[in-house]
Image (cartoon, rainbow, N blue to C red):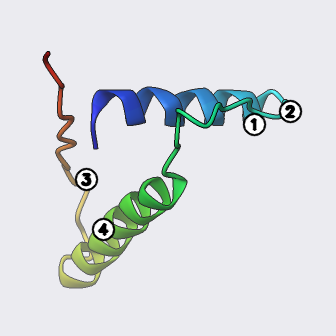
């Protein structure tokens, strides 16, 4: 994921939270499938850890963001 995608996803989520319809131009393509898959993968990993270690108190995940420099 790059910084632009992360910002667009935040924009869409903020608008939905406020009950508004997000306005995206054709130049801005928001990959919400990626966002859903990302969270699904994290939830799956947490569930696996809970099964392995029932007394687990927390998990740590790292999010990498690509910063495009011109």
Q: For the N terminus, give its image quadrant.
A: top left
Q: Which residue is mark 3?
A: 58
Q: Which residue is mark 2?
A: 19
Mark 4 vs mark 3, CA separation in Å: 9 Å
Viewer-proximal residue, 43 or 35?
35
Mark 3 vs mark 2, CA separation in Å: 32 Å
Between tags 3 and 1, which lies in front?
1
Q: Which residue is mark 1?
A: 16
Mark 1 vs mark 4, CA separation in Å: 27 Å
Q: Secondary structure at mark 4?
A: helix
Q: Secondary structure at mark 1?
A: helix
Mark 1 vs mark 2, CA separation in Å: 5 Å
Q: Is 50 placed left or right of 39 in the picture?
A: left
Between tags 2 and 4, which lies in front?
2
| Position of residue 20 measured from the top left corner of the image (x, y, whole percent) | 84, 30
N-terminal label among 3 and 2: 2
Residue at left offset 20%, top offset 50%: 61
| Position of residue 12 measured from the top left corner of the image (x, y, whole percent) | 63, 34
Q: For the C terminus, give its image quadrant.
A: top left
N-terminal label among 1 and 4: 1
Give residue 21's quadrant in the image: top right
Q: Residues within 10 Å of mark 4 (few under 14, many from 20)?
A: some
In the rendered view, tell whether residue 14 sits above or below residue 48.
above
In the rendered view, tell whether residue 62 sits above or below residue 43.
above
Mark 2 vs mark 4, CA separation in Å: 30 Å
N-terminal label among 4 and 3: 4
Mark 3 vs mark 1, CA separation in Å: 29 Å
Q: Which residue is mark 4?
A: 46
N-terminal label among 2 and 4: 2
Q: Residues within 10 Å of mark 2 (few under 14, many from 20)?
A: few
Residue contact at pointers 1 and 2, CB within 8 angstroms: yes
């Amino acid at each position: 994921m790059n910084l632009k995608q992360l910002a667009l996803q935040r924009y869409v989520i903020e608008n939905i939270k406020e009950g508004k319809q997000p306005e995206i131009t054709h130049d801005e393509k928001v990959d919400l499938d990626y966002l859903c898959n990302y969270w699904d993968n994290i939830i799956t990993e947490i569930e696996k850890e809970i099964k392995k270690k029932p007394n687990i108190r927390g998990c740590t995940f790292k999010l990498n963001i690509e910063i495009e420099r011109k």
